[in-house]
Amino acid sequence: MSAARRGEAAWLLAATLVVSVAGLTYELIAGAASSYLLGDSVRQFSFVIGLFLSAMGVGAWVSRWVEDPVAGFLRAQVGLGVIGGCGALVAFFSYAATGIVALPLYGSLFAVGVLSGLEIPLLARLLEGTRFRFENVLTFDYLGALVAALAFPVLVVPNLGLVQAGLAFGLLNLAVAGGTLWLFRDRVGGLDRAAWAVAVVAVAGLLAVAPRLQGVLDARLYADEVILAERTPYQAVAVTRHRGRTRLYLDGAIQFDTRDEAIYHEMLVHPAMAQAPRRARVLVLGGGDGMAVREVLRWEPEAVVVVDLDPAVVRLFRERDDLAALNGFAFRDPRVEVVHADAFAWVRDWDGAPFDVAVLDLPDPKNLSLSRLYTVEFYRGLRRALGGQGVMVTQAGSPVFAPEAYGIVAGTVGAVWDAAPYRAYVPSFGMWGFVMGMPGLAGRQAAYPAGLTHLTPEVWTRARVDVAAGEVNRLSAHPLPRAYERGWSEWFE
């Protein structure tokens, strides 16, 4: 085999690795974007994987009609650079402008899958006559998938975000196309060269202005001025401000509004703290904004342990003075220890000193991953982490919009403790529900600390409700996310 032919083969195998990294990255971007915008990450990633793999099968089948493998591979790379590179950008702008997500997101994903499916058959044809076997192509393809899977959560999303990542990897495909153009320059026409040049200019230009585009996108998504927006490996975080009010959004869903957050956090924390015989050691699961911790500290505990998955949120509300002031600089208190871990695994593995109170300020159970934090198995592990007289409380969603889901949470808590469901009207959320669990229901509570703006003994008396206990939520069967989705969809779809 000639030196020139060996050089071609080496380039094509390197290109196999690169395009595999880019292809899987587009798939992961689509899965993350669909989870952010459509919810239920398990379902969305399942749809994305199934659609992408089936589209690759279509591309592999179509490749038999591509007469010129050089032109076919080159055009596939240009198409991937443009469609794959701009897919997340188009999906987010479509959502912001029209509320439509599925068509642009899944449409671009299908096109990317077809173009990706063309690559391996065409590369195999280009490598015919060399000492490299088809197994070599597959080896480099699978190796590229491993690289992408490891790099996406660790390097790509934290440093680029979804929109910029898509455009950056689009340029990677276009770079492969450029190398192919040069290597097979005697077999490529002027039209293909022009199309490649236009694509490079367009995608590079979009990448250059991506931060500005992200600002425009955030302005469309949120009615208020966006003072901070970033995408972490776990979620999209945005903080907005309007007329002195600050709001936090995670994955587009409001978490608090300073106009009424005291209602929510006082109702979440103080009934359980008042009910507990001891309050020396308090566990807070979730609550990365620090508002629940602020309320816990009013009781002068000896130690507070906060378990929150996303360090970016805690960092914002600990290090930025304007945001830290909202929680009374709770994360700077020496009594507060923050652990960044999955709450389910942390509670399961806990073997330290017991806690007196556990406050669960967790996301709504809208998918299976979050539903684990509302299962009877999780609550049993939490009871082991609490002392014999320990008290827990969890936010439980809306008893108005999703009453079936609220009943399931109450029933699941009631399978482990005596459950006390209650509710409060929070203007930003509507009527909102909570469930307290304790080893024995007691009517008497300690006096609330001074300085509360909403909760009084009279408010607490009115907040108590009787709820028909629903089906118990278990790891082996999750009725809760289905009930949650049914409830909200009846109102808003």
Image (cartoon, rainbow, N blue to C red):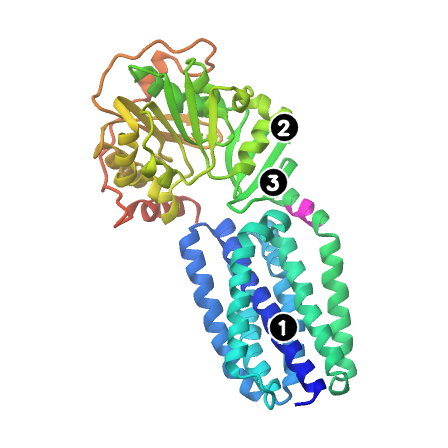
Q: Residue at x 32, y 10 (%)?
A: 446
Q: Amino acid at mark 3?
A: Tyr
Write the start and end of the magenta stretch as one range: 213-217
Q: Earlier in the sequence, mark 1 or mark 3?
A: 1
Q: Is residue 462 magenta?
A: no
Residue identified by numbered label 1: 14
Relative height, residue 133 to residue 113 (above, below): below
Describe residue 377's horizontal placement relative to residue 95 as left or right. left
Please say whether residue 207 is visible from this viewpoint: yes
Single out the mark in the foreground, 1 or 3: 1
Single out the mark in the foreground, 2 or 3: 2
Crowding around mark 1 (Cα neighbors within 10 Å: few <14, some 14 to 19, many 20+) is: some
Residue identified by numbered label 3: 222
Describe residue 412's horizontal placement relative to residue 98 as left or right. left
Q: Amino acid at mark 1?
A: Ala
Q: Residue at x 44, y 24 (%)?
A: 265
Q: Earlier in the sequence, mark 2 or mark 3?
A: 3
Measured from the top left, where is residue 259 in percent x and y? 54, 24
